Amino acid sequence: MSGTVRRTGARRLLGVLALASILLVPARIPSATAATGPGTAAVPPPPAKSVVTWAASADRMGEAAGDRSYRLIVRTSVGGKALRVRVSNAFGDRPLVIGSAYAGLHESGARLRPGSNKKLRFDGSASVTLAPGEIRYSDPLPGRVAAMSDLAVSLYVRDAGGPATGHGMALATSYATSGDHAARERDEAYTERLGSWFYLDAVTVDADRGAGAVVALGDSITDGWQSTTDRNLRWPDFLARRLHASAGSTVKGVANAGISGNQVLADGAAQSALKRLDRDVLSLPGVRTVFLFEGVNDIKAHTGVTAASLTAGYREIIDRSHAAGLCVVGATVMPFKGWSEWDPQGEAVRAEVNEWIRTSGEVDAVVDFDKVVRSPYDAERILPVFDNGDHLHPNDKGMQAMADSVALKSLECDRAPALSR
């Protein structure tokens, strides 16, 4: 059923009815809209023409420090004009002062392509102060950035304290140093190597007319754990390359909203998918489709999660995405026999959940990752050629096989927000 698309008038009507149900009765499980505290502040409206070209979901990152420069290396998916960066103090409990910010093209190490480093401004100012929980877009840069470009976003954090905001498992090398070196194109000052991104959670561009994006909402498999560092071999990276090469696809942007250890229902390794959905997915500009691929961490956590409770969580994500005018592609949960937390009870839940994904009709399309990576000799295990060795996470070949199984047509979406129908 990989890539099966379901977009009938009846499904649209059901989306309206589902939204009405959310508005009239309590949600089945706690929703992000009712959450308070760090990480739940409102996100500013996205620029009108923008499409997300890169993203990494924010989390709490330990103690922040001032008078530091970060050179953050990221790769675009869709190309376009008017590049903007989105900076985040989502988990901060005190003001974050970014004294200067630049964006340029990465050459090697912390070195930039000569002449490419351009000053970013925020409402015309070279510096910006973010209140606790605040998220801000920069002003657009003139010029055009190509698809599949390696960007270096340099932030000088003049003043910071308390919890830092960032993304822990980048699987890409970035750099840091003391003092303000954001404007420098050479790399001598950047003596520290980082495996995380700090304060930057999205990059957008004004893409060609008609272009849109897909957001992959997931856990460590989507975050890329066990793929090769600095080579952009996570499965969403492979998908981005396929979309870039496809003349027929209008979905060109790919945003990775995976967080290692993340669960649909419970906080733990970051906020639950339900709590972070608005900030990490629905707020991103130009998004047409949510690619929902979570659940294994809920199942193997041994907290009593049932197929009914997990699919209720999926339904809330689907309902909220549909209400925002987005389609939802659902991917089946992959096998993990051999991982230390596997047991027959969890396997039974996984089988029931996957049957629901395949047959319920709740999602707009199905991608059967379980079928793609499982062994023909033991369907509860990953095929050895795709197994990195821990029996849960795929290797680079597995990541590519997953991306190759996605029917690109399933990512196209013409759904309008439910309230407008």
Image: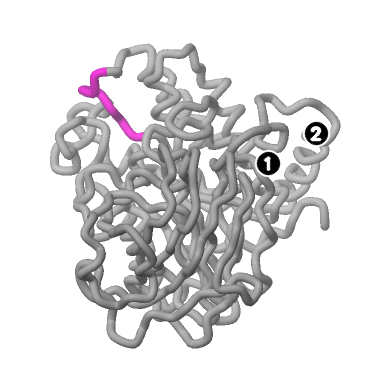
Q: Secondary structure at mark 1?
A: helix
Q: CA distance from mark 1 to mark 2?
A: 10 Å
Q: Nearer the viewer, residue 253 or 382?
A: 253
Q: Amino acid at mark 2?
A: Ser
Q: Label for residue 21?
A: 2
Horizontal relation, residue 45 to residue 181: left or right: right
Q: Position of residue 167 (x, y in %)?
A: 41, 47
Residue 287 occupies quadrant: bottom right
Residue at 66%, 53% in the rendered image: 43
Residue 348 occupies quadrant: top left
Q: Residues within 10 Å of mark 2 (few under 14, many from 20)?
A: few
Above/below status of 326 relative to 169: below
Q: In the image, which residues are magenta?
A: 334-340
Q: Secondary structure at mark 2?
A: helix
Residue at 57%, 20% in the rendered image: 308
Q: Amino acid at mark 1?
A: Asp
Q: Which is more N-terminal, label 2 or label 1?
A: 2
